Image: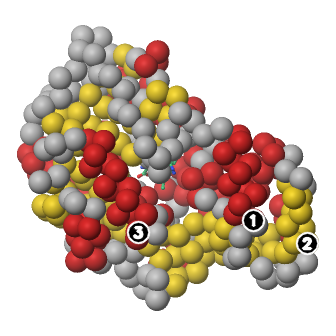
Amino acid sequence: MTARIDMLRLHDLEPTIEEFREAVVAGLGSTPKTLPCKFFYDAEGSRLFDAICELPEYYPTRTELAILRRHAGEMADEIGPDAGIVEFGSGAGIKIRLLLAALERPAAYVPVDISREHMLAAAQDLAAEFPGLRIAPVCADYTRTFALPALPGAHPQSMVGFFPGSTIGNFAPSEAVAFLARARRLLGRNALMLVGSDLPKDRETLEAAYDDAAGVTAAFNRNLLVRMQRELAAELDIDGFRHEARWCPVQRRVEMHLVSLSRQEIRVAGHRFAFERGETIHTENSHKYSLPEFRALAGRSGWLPARCWTDPEERFAVHLLRSG
Ligand SMILES: C[S@@+](CC[C@H](N)C(=O)[O-])C[C@H]1O[C@@H](n2cnc3c(N)ncnc32)[C@H](O)[C@@H]1O
């Protein structure tokens, strides 16, 4: 079989500009002001996230990659031959290469991402590296229900969800449970799921990871304002907001905010949103779960925690879940 991405089968459920506008109006109209982190990821946001992954302060990517390099063989043994892999938030598709290379005859790979062009470029590269693998990309918002594409010619023996990057931590715990339950329904009976989850650690390490010295995470956060200007013709002063990352020990999460440097207004979609000096837009949460906390969360969504791999310093964990 020749390597190919079945572009005609690209399942395109990219959020519309109306959805972005509605989310901005609802988020800036709420108290405290918020914006959903999924809108970080246009082409520029994805490029900035890839740059974050290379930063010395951003330990999660290299730690999870090291876990995968070391244990992909054991993960592949648990999964078995002829599996169909669905990756949620596939991004640049770096980590999946390690798993695909270890798997016996992977039957199909379905990357799912909100950032269409970035996902398609990654899928093209992957097709060149894994000739014979059927790749069926889906551009969708995984916080909503969507269907898996047909996989003609592929006959997966089992379906496996892959959700690396500690992206699970971007959900509130109740949303994470709802997401995992939806993924379990999507993957069907006898499914498995591998989930990368960051572990709690000291404030200094956590805040530096989300507020690097080179200012890349700050640019990533402010990209929300750039998108509002460009896509929604918002009237706002991008330099009037600074990036902030805070470890909140009670909620056990790092919060990212855009802090208003003065009294000002954002005008967008016929609305005016007033800011006091120091008032913030809360743009992202990154929850950190201990190993037992994550297992309890997975259990609440109906998955059975089966195995877990960590690095020697216990900075990051990759959990294997079974649908039961
Ligand atoms: C934190 S990055 C992780 C990327 C990659 N999986 C990794 O481990 O490095 C989150 C990824 O999920 C995608 N994403 C974020 N929210 C999404 C949503 N609601 N639906 C689909 N994709 C989403 C982003 O475009 C991005 O590629």
Residue 115 pos. (x, y %): 56, 40
In this view of the protein, can residue 131 be seen by the observer? no
Quadrant (top left/top right/bottom left/bottom right) for the N terminus: top left
Q: Residues within 10 Å of mark 2 (few under 14, many from 20)?
A: some
Query: What number is the disc on residue 174?
Result: 3
For ligand 1, tell me if the residue under mark 1 lies within 8 Å.
no
Q: Residues within 10 Å of mark 3 (few under 14, many from 20)?
A: few
Q: Which residue is mark 1?
A: 28
For the point 69% across and 76% down, which residue is it? 32
Question: Upstream in the sequence, badge 1 or badge 2?
Answer: 1
Q: Which residue is mark 2?
A: 264
For label 2, the SS is strand
For ligand 1, tell me if the residue under mark 3 lies within 8 Å.
no
Q: Is residue 278 above or below residue 136?
A: below
- Distance in Å between CA atoms under marks 1 and 2: 13 Å
For the point 43% across and 19% down, which residue is it? 9
Residue 314, quarter of picture:
bottom left
Residue 84 pos. (x, y %): 23, 33
- Distance in Å between CA atoms under marks 3 and 2: 34 Å
In this view of the protein, can residue 11 be seen by the observer? yes
